[in-house]
Amino acid sequence: QVQLVESGGGLVQPGGSLRLSCAASGGIFSINTVGWYRQAPGKERELVASITGGGRTNYADSVRGRFTISRDNAKSTVFLQMNSLKPEETAVYYCNGVLISPLGSRGNYWGQGTQVTVSS
């Protein structure tokens, strides 16, 4: 089954850091554009950061300068380094990406989400 799998969430104190990973599984795929989203209880899902296949990045104003999105194409994995975390950033974090098979077919996939809790 083709899917994106997130990992790296957990409990961290305010001001702390976490590194999330988003990896393709279920076959040999390359990942094109990937976005990291988050959804807090009672709120809409919002885009946090994105990265294109060529490495161009984009960030929400609220995280610019604290979060860094990067990718390892050889491992078909995208990372989100989160520093100086705030309690209001407690949410389930999801990745969304376009996976490309060796034959060139494309599909858009969401991961299952990973919980990030920022609390003392």
Image: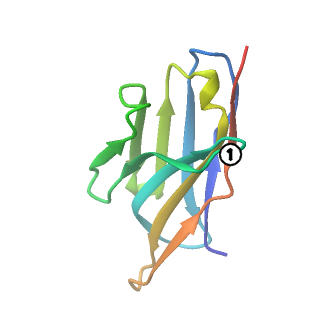
**Count of numbered tags:** 1
- The percent coordinates of residue 71 (x first, y second) are 40, 48
Left or right? Give the position of 103 relative to 95. Answer: left
Identity of the residue drawn at 37% across and 31% down:
64
Q: Quadrant of the C terminus?
A: top right
Q: Please say if 116 is above or below 75.
A: above
- The percent coordinates of residue 79 (x first, y second) are 48, 43
- The percent coordinates of residue 15 (x first, y second) are 56, 15
Question: What sort of colour scheme is used for the picture?
Answer: rainbow
Q: Please say if 55 is above or below 11.
A: below
- The percent coordinates of residue 56 (x first, y second) are 26, 50
Tell me the SS state at disc 1. strand
Q: Quadrant of the N terminus?
A: bottom right
Q: Please say if 80 is above or below 94.
A: above
Instruction: Give 35 or 41, whichever is nearer the viewer.
Output: 41
When asked about the image quadrant of residue 100, the answer is bottom left
Instruction: Give 80 or 29, whichever is nearer the viewer.
Output: 80
Identity of the residue drawn at 62% across and 16% down:
14
Residue under label 1: 114
**Please, what is the three-letter code of the amino acid marked with disc 1?**
Thr
- Badge 1 crowding class, 10 Å Cα cut-off, few under 14, some 14 to 19, many 20 or more, is many
Identity of the residue drawn at 43% across and 31% down:
63
